[in-house]
Image (cartoon, helix red, strand yellow):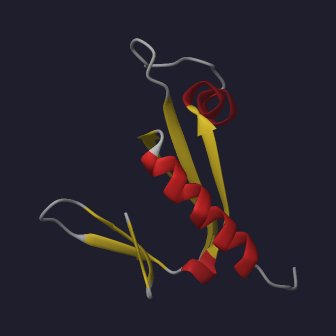
């Protein structure tokens, strides 16, 4: 994932890229794996080994056909720091809208 002027760009190594414009992002959750699994899968199962804790970033965004979400996992601290900074920018960029 890379933040550009166009938005968030998700790209596979030597593969296709998908761009999510920041103005379409309505929220960002950062959850430890246990909480993510409980909230979105109904079980608090975890795949972690040892002391490492997997975290999940869940981007909520508006698509042409309604609200959607994009989730991916990461490890702290570097990625978490970048996501927390992005989260504050998304919150600051939010404006009024009509339901």
Along the viewing direction, whichever of 6 and 61 lies nearer the viewer? 6
Rendered residue at 44%/41% (across/down): 73
Residue at left 43%, top 42%?
A: 74
Q: Position of residue 94 (x, y in %)?
A: 76, 79
For the point 54% across and 57% down, the residue is 83
Q: Is residue 70 visible?
A: no
Q: Which quadrant of the figure has residue 18?
A: bottom left
Residue drawn at point x = 69 percent, y = 34 percent: 39
Number of disc labels: 0
Find residue 42 and report its horizontal and vertical position in percent.
66, 25
Q: Is residue 35 left or right of residue 99?
A: left
The quadrant in which the C terminus is found is: bottom right
User: In which quadrant is the N terminus drawn?
Assistant: bottom left
In this rendering, the answer to whether 66 lies above or below 49 is below
Q: Residue furthest left?
A: 14
* Quarter occupied by residue 90: bottom right
Spot occupied by residue 19 in the image (x, y as percentages of width and height): 40, 76
């Amino acid at each position: 994932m890379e933040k550009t002027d166009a938005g968030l760009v998700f790209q596979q190594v030597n593969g296709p890229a998908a761009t999510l414009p920041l103005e379409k992002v309505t929220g960002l959750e950062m959850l430890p794996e246990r909480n993510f699994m409980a909230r979105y899968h109904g079980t608090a199962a975890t795949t972690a080994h040892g002391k490492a804790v997997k975290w999940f970033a869940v981007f909520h965004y508006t698509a042409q056909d309604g609200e959607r979400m994009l989730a991916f996992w990461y490890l702290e601290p570097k990625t978490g720091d970048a996501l927390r900074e992005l989260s504050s920018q998304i919150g600051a960029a939010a404006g009024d809208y009509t339901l």
